[in-house]
């Protein structure tokens, strides 16, 4: 599944590159305000941070929400206290677009994550050109040399790398690459089953000075409490927010 998602994302990026050149993207980047410092925004505090996601669908759950107006949803997230917003831009399985990212950027002032299957520099230029402050790198989908190279390239554009892991080996690879914003995803990419206890089993490997993000299986107040007790600085929440009352849920989660 992961290989297919990367292949599709790269194929779609190659098609976009036929009409939007690297120089076009560089010109757009020059017109963007500097990227927001995500490490400062998500610095540990008394209460958990929420990275709230604009998410229409997923491979494991299918369609979740129509989200005809991602700007309105993002403004709701920001007003309710989300520290940052994740925008799915993968088209095939998640039904997102880069236009969603640009639209959200035009309306909110918090850090934005481009959530996609990023495997080349063109995709990173796209992320910055469309207003992203943070970019996703999935350790499971990248050789170590590629992880290091892409992380350096995105950071040179002013963005922050959000490095996602799923087990101890991947976590140690992320730390070896000097990642400072690290996620532990409870979802097994082979079975799509979730293990809420995975974060707790790995968190002790993450040193001070690295922001710890718990991903997946965040459905309720109790889930947020569980992750916070295990040491999470941030929870990334998508499905619960787009299928429920986002403002009410954020108000509840942010008390943890």
Image (cartoon, helix red, strand yellow):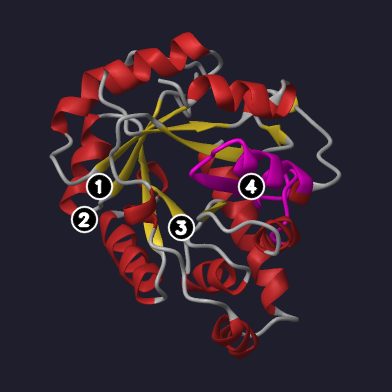
Determine whether 165 is above or below 5 in the image.
Answer: above
Name the residue located 79 percent from the left edge and 31 percent from the top edge.
65
Disc on res. 134: 3
Q: CA distance from mark 3 to mark 4?
A: 12 Å
Residue 66 lies, in percent from the top left, at 84, 36
Task: Mark 1 and mark 4 in contact? Answer it, CB < 8 Å.
Answer: no
Lateral position of residue 39 relative to residue 187, left or right = left
Q: Is residue 50 left or right of residue 214?
A: right
Q: Which residue has dot 4 on it?
A: 88
Q: Which residue is mark 2?
A: 177
Task: Quarter of the image for the C terminus: give it.
Answer: top left
Q: Which element type, helix, strand or loop, lies under badge 3?
A: strand
Query: How far from the left and from the top, in percent, is residue 24?
Result: 65, 87
Mark 3 vs 2, N-terminal side: 3
Closer to the camera in the image, 12 or 250: 250
Disc 3 + disc 2, Cβ < 8 Å: no
Q: Is residue 147 above or below residue 163?
A: below
Q: CA distance from mark 2 to mark 1?
A: 5 Å
Which numbered mark, 4 or 2, is in the foreground of this view? 4
* In the image: residue 193, left or right of residue 68: left
Tag 4 secondary structure: strand
Q: Residue at x 54, y 13 (%)?
A: 220
Verify CB contact (< 8 Å) between mark 2 and mark 1. yes
Q: Earlier in the sequence, mark 3 or mark 4?
A: 4
Residue beneath the point at 21% across and 55% down? 177
Q: Position of residue 8 (x, y in %)?
A: 64, 53
- Please give the name of the residue rendered at 18% of the width and 36% of the height, measured from the top-left corner: 206
Q: Residues within 10 Å of mark 3 (few under 14, many from 20)?
A: many
Helix, strand or loop at disc 1?
helix
Give the number of the mark in front: 1 or 4.
Answer: 4
Range covered by the magenta-colored residues:
72-98
């Amino acid at each position: 599944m992961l290989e297919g998602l990367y292949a599709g994302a790269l194929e779609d990026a190659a098609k976009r590159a036929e009409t939007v050149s690297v120089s076009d993207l560089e010109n757009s980047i020059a017109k963007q305000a500097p990227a927001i410092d995500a490490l400062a925004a998500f610095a540990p505090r008394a209460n958990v941070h929420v990275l709230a996601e604009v998410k229409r669908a997923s491979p494991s759950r299918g369609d979740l929400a129509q989200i005809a107006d991602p700007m309105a949803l993002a403004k709701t997230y920001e007003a309710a206290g989300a520290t940052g917003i994740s925008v799915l831009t993968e088209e095939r399985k998640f039904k997102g677009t880069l236009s969603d990212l640009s639209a959200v950027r035009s309306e909110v002032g918090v850090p934005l994550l481009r959530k996609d299957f990023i495997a080349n520099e063109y995709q990173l230029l796209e992320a910055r050109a469309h207003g992203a402050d943070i970019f996703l790198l999935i350790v499971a989908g990248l050789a170590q040399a590629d992880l290091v190279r892409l992380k350096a390239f995105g950071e040179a554009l002013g963005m922050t790398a959000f490095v996602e892991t799923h087990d101890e080996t991947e976590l140690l690879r992320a730390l070896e690459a000097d990642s400072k914003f690290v996620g532990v995803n409870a979802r097994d990419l082979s079975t799509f089953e979730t293990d809420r206890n995975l974060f707790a089993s790995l968190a002790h490997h993450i040193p001070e000075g690295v922001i710890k993000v718990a991903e997946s299986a965040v459905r309720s107040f109790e889930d947020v409490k569980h992750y916070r007790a295990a040491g999470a600085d941030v929870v990334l929440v998508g499905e619960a927010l787009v299928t429920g009352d986002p403002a009410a849920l954020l108000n509840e989660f942010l008390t943890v």
